[in-house]
Image (cartoon, helix red, strand yellow):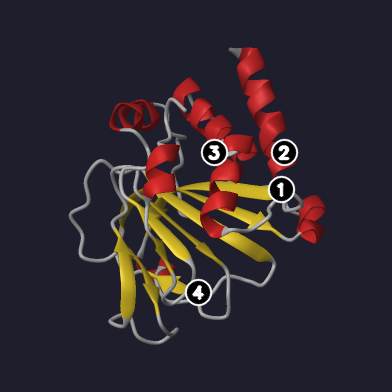
Amino acid sequence: MRMLDLERLDAATLGTDPCTYVHVPGFVRADALREINRDYPDIRERGNFPPEDLSFGPAFATLLEELASPEMKSAFERKFGIDLSQNPLQLTARKYVDETDSGLHNDSRTKVVTVLVYFNEAWEHEGGKLRLTRNEHDFTDYTVECEPKDGNLLAFVRSSTSFHGYLPCSAERRSIQMYWVKPKREQRDPGSAGSLVKKLKRFLKRG
C-alpha cells in the first residue's frame, strides 16, 4: 500500500495485557503523512465525524480507501487471529479535543476490534497520549502508551478488560477511529463501511 505500512503491522509484537492489542509506531508512511495533513478535513469543532459528512482532499480520500480495503481487514485478521468477514467497518475522523474528552472507559460490546491512527506531526502535550490500562480508575496502571502523532497506530480486541483513555489536554489532535462491529449495527450507524464506500465513489467521481 502507498500510505499504510502493513509489513510493519505484521511484524509488530502482539500484546495481551490488559487485552489483545498491537502498537505500531509509524504505521502511516512519513511521506504520506504530509499529504494526508495537507488534505485533512476542515473540521472546526470537537467530535467524531463520519467521512460522508466531511470535505477533504484526494490524499485523505486515498487514505480512507486503504483503511477500508480488504488487505487492511486481512492484516488485522492475521494479527488478532479473528474472522472479521461478517463484521462491518465503521470509521470517523477527529481534529480537536479538550479536557472534557479525556477519561478511562471501555468500548461497547457491539465493537469487536478498535483501531486508532494519529496524524499530528508533533505532540508537545503531557496529556492526550492514549493508554491501555488494567482498570477504569487508574491512569498510572497502564501497559502501553501511544503518542498521537507520526502515523502511530494502536488497535485492540474489545474485551471486558480493554480499558483505555488519555490524560486531559486541549489541542488539535488529528485521528481516525475505526471499528469492526457486530453485524446488527450496520444498518443504523451512519459511519458504516457501506456509506464510506459511497462517499469515496462520489468524491472520486467529482475529481
Residue position marked by numbered label 2 in the rendering: 195
Labels 2 & 1 near each other (Cβ < 8 A): yes
User: With respect to residue 38, does 169 lie above or below?
Assistant: below
SS for callout 1: loop
Q: Quadrant of the C terminus?
A: top right
Q: Which mark is residue 67?
A: 3
Three-letter amino acid code at the position of disc 1: Pro
Foreground disc of the pair 1, 4: 4
- Measured as percent of width and height from the top left, residue 127 is found at 26, 66
Labels 3 & 1 near each other (Cβ < 8 A): no
Question: Mark 4 packing: few (<14 Cα in 10 Å), some, or many (20+)?
Answer: many
Quadrant in which residue 124 is drawn? bottom left
Q: Residue at x 44, y 46 (%)?
A: 10
Q: CA distance from mark 4 to mark 2?
A: 28 Å
Q: CA distance from mark 2 to mark 1?
A: 7 Å
Q: CA distance from mark 3 to mark 1?
A: 17 Å
Residue position marked by numbered label 1 in the rendering: 190
- Measured as percent of width and height from the top left, residue 37 is found at 36, 32
Can residue 129 be seen here? The reply is no
Sequence-earlier tag: 2 or 1:
1
SS for callout 2: helix
Residue position marked by numbered label 4 in the rendering: 162
